[in-house]
Image: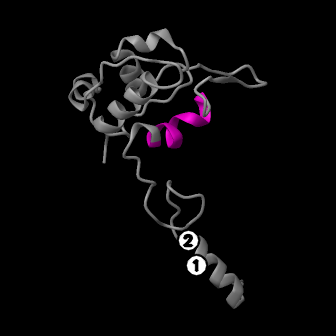
Amino acid sequence: MMRFVFLSPATLLALTLMSQAAHADTASGETGKVQVMDTGEAVYHHVCQSCHMPDGKGARNTAGAGFPALANNGRLQDSGYPVYMILNGRGGMPWFSGILTDKQVADVANYVRSHFGNHWTDAVSPQAVEELRPTVKLEE
């Protein structure tokens, strides 16, 4: 025996709206462009500060997870260190080589190396980032 299910117009409308694809740059099904990140400060505020905090001092949460301080961090003296960390991640830090451009990586590395009590003045170039970028190609 076959049964038929009749859906109200409101249910049909809801199902139609739910079938639209959500995009990673929004919290809903709305589409739009990702926020422009054309400076190291912009990249830091949109990508890094949620873990490393707005003041760069890092944090520890109640579960014991730690986010290292970038403020007054002697490891940043070597310009390759932040570039490597941004591109490849480590431990709980994700890698951003598939997300950020060479210029964005250089800009944010230069930003953290010259802010938060850090005073390293030898600038990282996008070309230096390109040389350190992993060579594995991502699927498109």
Three-letter amino acid code at the position of disc 2? Ser
- Decide whether residue 46 is among the magenta residues: yes
Q: Which residue is mark 1?
A: 16
Q: Main secondary structure of the magenta part?
A: helix
Three-letter amino acid code at the position of disc 1? Thr
Q: CA distance from mark 2 to mark 1?
A: 5 Å
Image disc number at residue 19: 2
SS for callout 2: loop
Residue in view at x 42 percent, y 27 percent = 86
From the top left corner, tell me how far across and down residue 47 is, in percent.
Answer: 50, 39
Q: Is residue 87 left or right of residue 24?
A: left
From the top left corner, tell me how far across and down residue 56 is, in percent.
Answer: 58, 26
From the top left corner, tell me how far across and down residue 37 is, in percent.
Answer: 41, 47
**What count of labels does the image hold?**
2
Q: Quadrant of the N terminus?
A: bottom right
The answer to whether 4 is drawn above or below residue 53 in the figure is: below
Q: Is residue 58 left or right of residue 76?
A: right
Residue 85 shows in this picture: yes
Q: Nearer the viewer, residue 5 or 32?
A: 32
Q: Tell me which segment is drawn in magenta.
A: 42-52
Density class for disc 2 (Cα within 10 Å; few <14, some 14-19, many ≥20) is few
User: Do the residues under discs 2 and 1 have CB atoms within 8 angstroms?
Assistant: yes
Q: Nearer the viewer, residue 25 or 15?
A: 25
SS for callout 1: helix
- Decide whether residue 9 is among the magenta residues: no
Kindly give the residue lying farthest to the top in the view shown. 74
